[in-house]
Structures are given as C-alpha cells and as structure tokens.
Amino acid sequence: MREATTTELNDLIRRMNAGDPAVRDQLMERAYTRLQRLARKMLRDFNRVGRWADADDVLQESMVRLLRALSDVPLTSAAEFFRLAATQIRRELLDLIKHFYGPEGMGAKHASDVPAVGSDGANPRHEKITSTLDPAKLAAWSEFHEKVDGLPDVERRVFDLLWYQGFSQAEAALVLNVSESTVKRRWVEAKAQLGEYMR
C-alpha cells in the first residue's frame, strides 16, 4: 500500500476523532512504512537489543502499545501520532533492555560482539553505553530514556523529533509550526534538563 502523506494522515486522525471506528486500523496501515523506519532507526540506538529481537518484533509489540494508547490519548495531528508512536517504541525497547539484560536476563549471561556501525549512516553516538554489559551503565541508559518521558511537553516534542526521529531543526520547526529559533531554544532546554545523562 502507498505510504500516506501527512495531509492524508491528518484527515484519518480527524475522522477517528469524529468517532469512525474503522479509521484507527486504516491509520495504522497507512502509517506502517513510516513506523517501520522509525523502529529500525531507534533499534540502532539500542543495538544490544538487536541480539535478541529485530525491528519487526519491536514494531509489532510497539503497535499493540500504540493501539492501546490511541484509546486514551487525544490526537490532533500526524506529528502527535508519530510522537506517540516513538514513545511506545522507546518503552518497548526499554522493557527489552530490562528483560534481556536485567539480573536474570539471557543477555547478561551471553557475550557477543556488537555489530559495527554500517555504511548506511547509523548513528554511533550511543555505542559506548548500549554496547556494555555493565548493569550500572545499562541502568543509566534506561533511566535516561525514562527521564525523556518526564520532560515538559514542549521540550519532549522537540527532543522526540530531533533525537529519536532524526529530524533537522528546520524540519522540526515545520512539523511543530513554530520558528526554528524556538526549536533551538527548546532543544537547549531539554538537553539542560537531561544534562547529567547527555554528558
């Protein structure tokens, strides 16, 4: 199926909010390709999870979470939909880290090489943390993502777009319908609040 445009997704969200029960499944279908790309990108930042689960596994469980969340969280735009999706994918990845690398996890008992960052542009910025089996470092990594969830809404939206979804500041400004300088300010504020973990 052809990937839906943002305008088409916004229309589906409007119809869903109007009470059309069939639209939620259509929304998930039409957004599937973008959700798949998002899951693949975020899994690269959790490369130890990739030892035990692939992007399709992560996406499947995340979509279950997303469907539940759609019943509780009002949406007004495609941007909010993908922000909610990124949150559910992040939570699924955090649960997988805890499951596989917690005290009783299989991953904590297996040594394996972490795949090298490929030529596809995968971002190596988290390599040192996500490659470790040190429980303290893994706990700090998990706590970092939990702290992201606790950011004020406006800062969290910017952080989601720039950090998890890989938008440029200019693209995020268009999505959020704010100036680029506002995005920069909110990005700085978010990083300041997450300063200990960002370092």
Image (tube, rainbow, N blue to C red):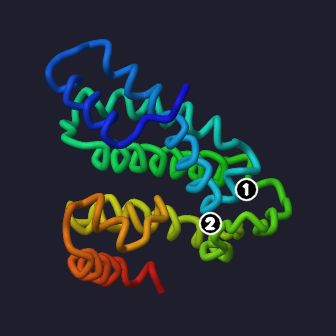
Q: Position of residue 132 (x, y in %)?
A: 70, 70
Q: Residue at x 25, y 68 (%)?
A: 155
Q: Which residue is mark 1?
A: 108
Q: Position of residue 18 (x, y in %)?
A: 14, 21
Q: Position of residue 158 (x, y in %)?
A: 31, 66
- Where 186 falls versus 87 (above or below)? below
Can residue 159 be seen in this snapshot? yes
- Where 51 falls versus 188 (above or below)? above
Q: Position of residue 120 (x, y in %)?
A: 73, 63
The residue at the far left in this view is 18
Q: Which residue is mark 2?
A: 135
Amino acid type, label 2:
Pro
Q: Nearer the viewer, residue 123 or 88?
A: 123
The answer to whether marks 1 and 2 mark residues whose Cβ atoms lie closer than 8 Å is yes
For label 2, the crowd category at 10 Å Cα-Cα, with few meaning under 14, some 14 to 19 and many 20 or more, is some
For label 1, the crowd category at 10 Å Cα-Cα, with few meaning under 14, some 14 to 19 and many 20 or more, is some
Residue 51 horizontal side relative to residue 36, left or right? right
- Where 86 falls versus 159 (above or below)? above
Q: Secondary structure at mark 2?
A: helix
